[in-house]
Amino acid sequence: MLDGHAKAATKPAPRKKAEPWTDVWERMDFDSKMSAKAVQMRKATGKMMDDVHDRLEKHVEETSFPAWIVDHFKPLGINGLTIKGLGSPGLTTFEAGSIIYELGKRDASIATFFLVHNAIGMAVVDVLGDEEQR
């Protein structure tokens, strides 16, 4: 029963600080469901995002787009995601999701940019475009 007197609030225990960029994907053994090539691409994408993270912060503050990031996607071979042939990796949807996971866990705007161009733009041309357009 309440007696009308407020009790002193107790301070909750401080939360443990999470490790930055913990590899949840690997911890949940998702890599075992992917090809070795896709695992390598996922890890390389994560490493690239780690390497450029500090440079991306400037663009957040300036509300500008880091056009230079496109050049960092090229060597990874991830453009085209699920498209087969034409220089694209032909990943499964699950494997493509791992690439997006690596981009998004570090910078959601970069993941969005990549998805719009790859999962929407390139996918439409792949399905509806003629050979010359592809």
Image (tube, rainbow, N blue to C red):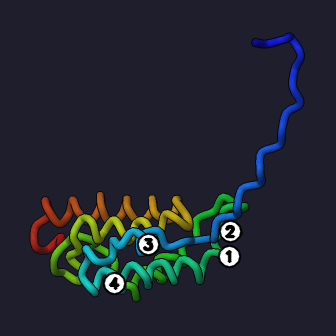
Distance Cα–Cα, label 4 vs label 2 = 25 Å
What's the distance in space between the residues labelled 4 and 3, CA to CA? 25 Å
Q: Which residue is mark 3?
A: 27
Given residues 126 and 36, the one toward you in this image is 36
Mark 1 or 4, nearer chain start:
1
Numbered disc 2: secondary structure: helix
Nearest to the observer: residue 32 or residue 3: 3
Question: x, y percentage for residue 62?
Answer: 71, 61
Amino acid type shown at disc 2: Glu
Q: Left or right: 78 with respect to 109?
A: left
Mark 3 or 2, closer to the camera: 3
Amino acid on which disc 1 is placed = Asp
Asked which secondary structure carries label 4, the reply is loop
Image point (89%, 16%), residue name: 5
Q: Residues within 10 Å of mark 4 (few under 14, many from 20)?
A: some
Q: Earlier in the sequence, mark 3 or mark 2?
A: 3
Q: Quadrant of residue 41?
A: bottom left
Left or right placement of residue 65 versus residue 131 in this view: right
Q: Quadrant of the N terminus?
A: top right
Q: Position of residue 111 (x, y in %)?
A: 46, 63
Mark 3: which secondary structure? helix
Q: Which residue is mark 1?
A: 54
Q: Secondary structure at mark 1?
A: helix
How many other residues sit within 10 Å of disc 1, few (<14), some (14-19) or many (≥20)? few
Q: Which mark is residue 57?
A: 2
Local packing at callout 2 (Cα closer than 10 Å; few below 14, some 14-19, many 20+) is: few
Identify the residue at horizontal 27%, vertical 86% (top origin). Answer: 36
